[in-house]
Image (spheres, rainbow, N blue to C red):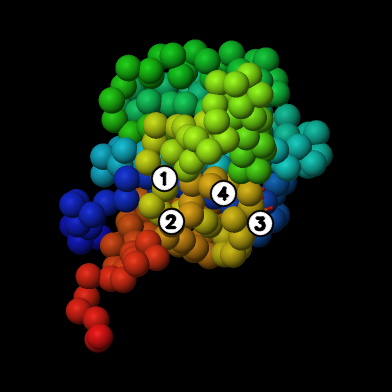
Amino acid sequence: MLRQIDAARLPRHVAIIMDGNGRWARNRHLPRVAGHRAGISSVRAAVETAARLHLPALTLYAFSTENWKRPESETSFLMRLLRRYLRDELSELQENNIRLQAIGRISELPEAVRDELRSTCQATASNTGTVLSLALNYSGRTELVDTFRLLAERVRRGELAPEAIDEQLIGAGLFTRGLPDPDLLIRTSGELRLSNFLLWQIAYAELWVTNTLWPDFRAKHFYQAILDFQSRDRRFGGLSDEPHAE
Ligand code: FPP
C-alpha cells in the first residue's frame, strides 16, 4: 500500500479522532481503561507513519473538554497514561524528528501533566520533522471563544479595527497557528460526528471514517485513508480540473 501512495500529493496535515477504546475493551470483557492503554500502541503507529511519510503535521484528539464528564477514575487514569506516554516515548519522538506541542486549555490540566508536557515539548522543540499536536482539554468551540476574546480585547484597547478581522487573523489566534489546516480528518469506530474537533480548521478537510476501533488502528489503516484521500476530487467550492460541459 505504501508503494501506491503518491508522495507528491500527501496531505499536509492529518487530524485523527481516536475513538472506540471503550468498545474495544468491552468486546474483550475488560475494563474501559484497558482500551485506553491498548490505544497507546495505535498512537505510536500513527506517529511513526506520519514521520515515515514526512507529513508536516499530525493532530490527535486525546482528551476533550467534555471528557471531564467521565468518572474520575477514568479521567485520572487517562492523565496518568498521558504522563507515562510522554516519558516513555521521548526517545521515539527524538528518533523520528517529531516536534511535540499541546493544544487546548492546557493551564487547566493537572500540574504533573503540565510539567511532563512542558519538558517533552522543550526537549523536542528544535526537531524539524512532523509537528505532533496533542489536543488535550480541547474543544473547537472553546478555542474559538478564546480567540475571539483576545481579538475583542485588542479592539477594546484601540489596537485593532473590527474591519481588520479576517480569516487570517482568526487563524493566527487559534492553537494551531502556523500549521496548515488539516487536509484529512480520520475518525475511528464508525461514528459520523465531528465531536467539537478543530471546527474552524476542518472547513475543507476530507473526512475518512473507519469502523476499526482505535486500539486496532495501525499503519495499514493510515495508508488506506491516504490512498482514499488521494482519489478524492477536491474542489474547495470551485470546479474540478476535469473538462466541464458549458
Ligand atoms: C475515545 O474512546 C478515546 C478517548 C477519550 C481517549 C483517547 C486516548 C488514548 C487513545 C490513549 C492516550 C493518548 C495519548 C496521546 C497518550 P472512548 O473511550 O470514547 O471509546 P468508546 O466510544 O468506545 O467508549
Q: Which label number is shown at residue 181?
A: 1
Badge 2 density bin: few <14, some 14–19, many ≥20, Cα 10 Å: many
Residue 128: % across, % down:
28, 25
3D distance between C-alphas at marks 4 and 2: 10 Å
Q: Which residue is drawn at 26% across and 39% down?
A: 54
Report whether 241 appears left or right of 107. left
Task: Tell me which label, 4 or 2, sits earlier in the chain.
Answer: 4
Indicate the amino acid at tag 2: Ala
SS for tag 3?
helix
Indicate the amino acid at tag 4: Leu
Which residue bears the numbered disc 3? Answer: 23
Indicate the amino acid at tag 1: Asp
Quarter for ligand 1?
A: top right
SS for tag 2?
loop
- Looking at the rendered image, the disc whose residue lies closer to the viewer, 3 or 1, is 1
Q: Which residue is drawn at 18% across and 52% down?
A: 8
Residue 225: % across, % down:
37, 59
Badge 3 density bin: few <14, some 14–19, many ≥20, Cα 10 Å: some
Which residue bears the numbered disc 4? Answer: 199
